[in-house]
Amino acid sequence: MAETTEPQLDEDGLVIQTYDSMVLVVVPQTGFGDQILRYARSSLYNVSVGTRSVAQDPDTDVKGRLQDEFLVDGPLAGETMDAYTGILIAGCEGPNPLANDAQVQALLRAAHADGKLIAAWGNGLEALAAAGVVKGRKVTGDASAQSATKSAGGKYTGRQLEVSNHIVTAVDEGSGMRFGQALAEVVRI
C-alpha cells in the first residue's frame, strides 16, 4: 500500500498549498476583467501553478470591472522574473496604465528572453507591444491595441484567442475558459 503524507497546515488549520511553479499576475488598480482573471488563476491552480498578484500601488485595493475588490500580494516595484515561469498582464477598461510602465516592460522582456509564458487579454496587449515581445507573432486583444501591435511588428488577428509559442493572448472576457486552458497548456511545456 502506498504511503500517504498528511498535508501541511497553517496556524488556522488550513492546508498550505504547494505549487510546482508560479506566474506573476500584474493588474491595474481599477477596471480589470474580473471573470477572465478568475478563469486564468483557476486553470493555473488546476495544474499546480500558483499566482502572485502585484499592482503599482499595493496598499490600495484593486477593483475589477464587476467590482471585485482585493488586496494584491505585493508591489510591482522590485519584481523580477527569476522566481516565475510566466507573467500575465491584465486588460482593463479605458487606457491601460501598465502599457507604458517601464517595470512591466522590463519584466516582459526578461520573460521573453527566457521563453517563459507571456499572457495578456484586452488592452493588456498594449504592454506586450510596448515591450517589443510581439514581433513576428500572431496576437489578439482589444481593437484599440491593433495599431501599437502592428507598429511593434506583431500580427494582430482579432480572433478570440491566439497562442504563439509561449505567448497567449485573448480578445476579451468571452474567451475566459479557453484562455485559462491555453495558459495551463503553455506553462506546463
Image (spheres, rainbow, N blue to C red):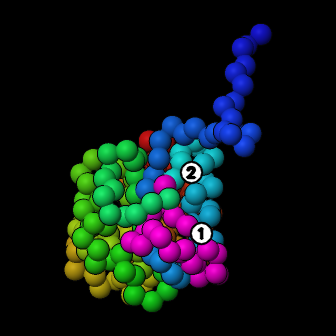
* Circle 1 residue: 70
Which residue is at the front of the view, 59 or 16?
59
Label 2 CA crowd tier, 10 Å (few <14, some 14–19, many 20+): many
Please name the amino acid that badge 1 sits on.
Answer: Phe
Image position of 1 with respect to 50: above or below = above
Instruction: For the N terminus, give its image quadrant.
Output: top right
Question: Which x, y percent locates residue 75?
Answer: 40, 63
Please name the amino acid that badge 2 sits on.
Answer: Leu
Q: Seen from this angle, which residue lies furthest front?
A: 11
Question: Which x, y percent locates residue 53?
Answer: 49, 61
Q: Mark 1: which secondary structure?
A: strand
**Quadrant location of residue 143?**
bottom left
Image position of 163 with respect to 93: above or below = above
**Quadrant location of residue 135?**
bottom left
Q: Seen from this angle, which residue lies furthest top?
A: 1
Instruction: For the C terminus, give its image quadrant.
Output: top left
Q: Which residues are magenta?
A: 52-72
Image position of 7 with respect to 182: above or below = above
Question: Which x, y percent locates residue 138?
Answer: 35, 67
Query: Which residue is painted at 29% across and 85% down in the image?
Result: 147
Q: Is residue 125 visible?
A: no
* Circle 2 residue: 44
Upstream in sequence: badge 1 or badge 2: 2
Question: Which x, y percent locates residue 159?
Answer: 48, 74
Query: Which residue is painted at 74% across and 39% down in the image?
Result: 13
